[in-house]
Amino acid sequence: MKTLTIVRHAKSSWETSTDDHDRPLNDRGMSAAPRVGSAIAEKGKIPDIIISSTALRAATTAKLIAKEIGIKDSLIHYDEQLYLASIRGYEEVISRLNEEDGTEHVMVVSHNPGSHELCYYLTGDDSIDRFITCAVARIDLDIEFWGQIGERTGKLIEFFTPHDI
C-alpha cells in the first residue's frame, strides 16, 4: 500500500506580466498554503517526500506546506515534467521514485486540470466537483511499487480545500 497526496498550487497572482511559469502566489495563496500545511500536520498524514512542479507558484506552495509539516527543503524535489502535466507525465514522474529509500507516502504539488484529472484517473471517484487552488486529495494506492501506479489503483481517502479549514 502506498499513499499519494495531490495538492493543487495555492492562488497565484495575475498582477504581473511575467511568463506563466514564473507567476508568484498572491496574498491569498501565501496565507492558504501554510493553513493547508497546518491542517495536514494536525491530521498526522505527513508525506516522506514532496515532488513539485518547477513553476514558481507550485514551488512556493510546496515550500510553505513543507515548513508547516516539518519536511526539510532537501526532501522537496522539483520536476519540470509536472508543469501542466498530463496523466502520462504524472505516471512517469511517480514511477521513477526509488523503491529502495522506503518512500511510502508522496505529495505531488502541481496544477489543474492535471491535479483533478489525476485524482479521478487513480480513483474513479467523481465526488470532487472542483479542485480549487490549494485543494488536497489523499489517495491510498493498492500497489506495492510506485511503478505499478495506474488507472483505478487507488481510493480517495480525504479531500479538503482551504475553505474547509
Image (spheres, helix red, strand yellow):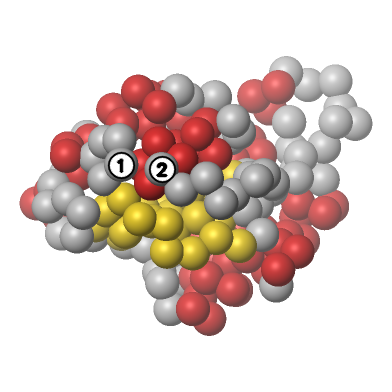
Q: Which residue is mark 1?
A: 152
Q: Which residue is mark 2?
A: 124
Say what amino acid the circle numbered 1 marks. Answer: Arg
Q: Is residue 92 above or below residue 7?
A: above
Q: Is residue 83 above or below residue 135?
A: above
Q: Is residue 90 above or below residue 133?
A: above
* Element type where label 2 sits in the image: loop
Residue sticking out furthest to the right? 15
Say what amino acid the circle numbered 2 marks. Answer: Gly
The image shows residue 75 at horizontal and vertical percentages of: 36, 54
Specify the quadrant that holds the N terminus: bottom left
In front of the other: 77 or 126: 126
> Is residue 119 shown to the viewer in this render?
no
Determine which quarter of the picture holds residue 150.
top left
The image shows residue 110 at horizontal and vertical percentages of: 53, 38
Give the alpha-carbon distance from disc 2 to disc 1, as whole Å. 6 Å
* Residue 46 relative to residue 33: left or right: left
